[in-house]
Amino acid sequence: MRAAVMERINEPLTEAEVDCDDLRQDEVLVRVTDSGICHSDRGAQLGHQDRQLPLVLGHEVAGVVARTGSHVTHVSVGDHVVGSAAAYCGTCRQCLLGQPQHCLSKGQVRADGTARLTAGGRPVQVMTGLGSFADHMIVSDRALVRVPPEMPLDKAALLGCAVVTGVGAVLHRARVRPGDTVAVVGCGGVGLNAIQAARMAGAAQIFAVDLVPAKLELAKAFGATHVVDASRQDSVETVREVSRGGVDHAFEVIGLPATIEQACQMTGIRGTTTIVGVAPIGSSMSLSPLAIMAGEKRVQGSRLGSANFRLDIPALCQLYLRGQLMLDELISEVIDLSQVNRGLDRLDSGETARSVIHFDHA
């Protein structure tokens, strides 16, 4: 199979032929059709996360089931599927509590520790048990969910991370209600989905905060009622002034200590800050305990939208097919695997909402 392999930290990925191991009884071979390029992929490339190398990045993916192990019953050959970066076992305490994103046995690696991929005899790891910067994946059957055949796979790929993370943070974790006021700091793929989820929830004011004017214009299309160009305005002061004292909910979707602090400062009395962005390992921030106590504020995290993958992904498909969920507008460009490094680099400039790698299996 063809894959883009990360050999060293902070260096371009290398396109190479990688060998797939034989399927285990609970595994599935997926023919990848589309894979989004996410900031988490870029963070891993830059060493912001502790990853074993060599590694195939990519975790926002859709494709078609090519083969299944003997014990797989959830999907069949020919099914259209979306991959989950947080597969679940269904039996651990977190799964039983309805929090599969925190499953203690995700099936991301094999129980015996052997690699699903090799190159030149060396084991090759895969990001979050997926590794979708490749034309095929071997994954645990618990990492897949079927989607309707009428769902376009390039749009379906985005559901697995950008959409479920942004929408779920608003609807599941923060539980934004009609009439609430919302600020979203960072208007990339995840941030735009947080904005459209706030619109769907009936938020009265939705502030989009970013440094890139083009992203702010796109945020308006997704439902932002106010845009704040943080390169020209004091974002905290602007949000607090226009919202008359601070918003009910602030979502930080970048993963930087400075912007997390700003998001917290944007909230008013009893406001909630939800941290969605993935911060580099070892980073820290400074918050005022007095301000949190006196204002009865809350600071919380949201992982993968606090979502139940096998329930939420089909529901999001239906919202898209009914014209209620914007996905087409998220795709800034469609590229080939050979252009993956350009797609990763473009994340730094903030030029794109999502670059999507398309694999032509014709």
Image (tube, helix red, strand yellow):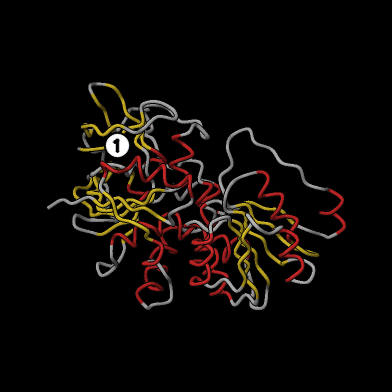
- The correct choice, above or below, for 3 with respect to 359 in the image is above
Residue positioned most to the left: 362
Query: In the picture provided, is 62 more to the left or to the right than 234?
Result: left
Q: Nearer the viewer, residue 27 or 186?
A: 186
SS state under label 1: strand
Count all numbered tags in the image, as a single digit.
1
Query: In the picture provided, is 3 more to the left or to the right than 298?
Result: left
Q: Which residue is mark 1?
A: 4
Residue positioned most to the front: 232
Query: In the picture provided, is 336 more to the left or to the right than 332?
Result: left
Q: Position of residue 341 (x, y in %)?
A: 35, 40
At 25% across and 26% down in the image, what residue appears?
119
Which quarter of the image is occupied by the N terminus? top left
Q: Residues within 10 Å of mark 1 (few under 14, many from 20)?
A: many
Residue 331 appears in view: yes
Q: Position of residue 96 (x, y in %)?
A: 53, 53
At 21% across and 34% down in the image, what residue appears?
22
Q: Position of residue 94 (x, y in %)?
A: 55, 49
Under mark 1, the amino acid is Ala
